[in-house]
Amino acid sequence: MHPRSEFLQRLRSAIGLPYRWGADGPTAYDCSGLMCACLGVEDTTAQGLYAEHRDHEVPRVRRPGQLVFYGRDTKHITHVMASLLCWDHGYWILVGARGGNQDTQTVHDAARVSALVDVVVHQRYRYHEVVAVIDPWGD
């Protein structure tokens, strides 16, 4: 199986798990912990993940498995998600761990405050804060 396919499969299997700041799995994740676990790399921050892969930056999301970074600019990255589906009209379906800095402990607690690994439509999720798109495989 291609590494991109494995990455996407791991992301899909994490959907519904609780968000917890600083968690890197396997029962809870924060945004960078999820991406690192699914990529099979050492856990780091969203900023660190961008720094490690910035040589694979692409102009926009064009295919599943690309990492979408959020923040003020590339020196102040605060969040990362991954594309799951893409359309040519600028719509992306993203998956990631998000929770508004909630420190949830159980799936029930996470669902109550919407702090989960979940799926969102890009056009409705912080689109104005996207600062970089990375394709870790560059293929």
Image: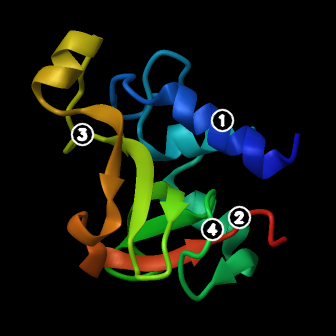
**Residue 29 as seen in the image, left or right of residue 49:** left
Secondary structure, mark 4, is loop
Q: How far apart are labels 4 and 1 at the CA level?
A: 15 Å
Residue receiving disc 1: 9
Q: Quadrant of residue 137?
A: bottom right
**Residue 92 as seen in the image, left or right of residue 49:** left
Question: Residue 21: image x %, image y %?
Answer: 34, 34
Residue receiving disc 3: 99
Secondary structure, mark 3, is loop
Q: In which quarter of the image is residue 89?
A: bottom left
Question: Residue 100: image x %, image y %?
Answer: 19, 45
Of the numbered discs in the image, which one, if any, rests on residue 63? 4
Q: How far apart are labels 3 and 2 at the CA level?
A: 24 Å
Residue receiving disc 2: 52
Secondary structure, mark 2, is helix
- Asked if labels 3 and 4 touch by Cβ distance under 8 angstroms, the answer is no
Q: How far apart are labels 4 and 3 at the CA level?
A: 25 Å
Q: Is residue 125 above or below residue 90?
A: above
Mark in the foreground, 3 or 2:
3
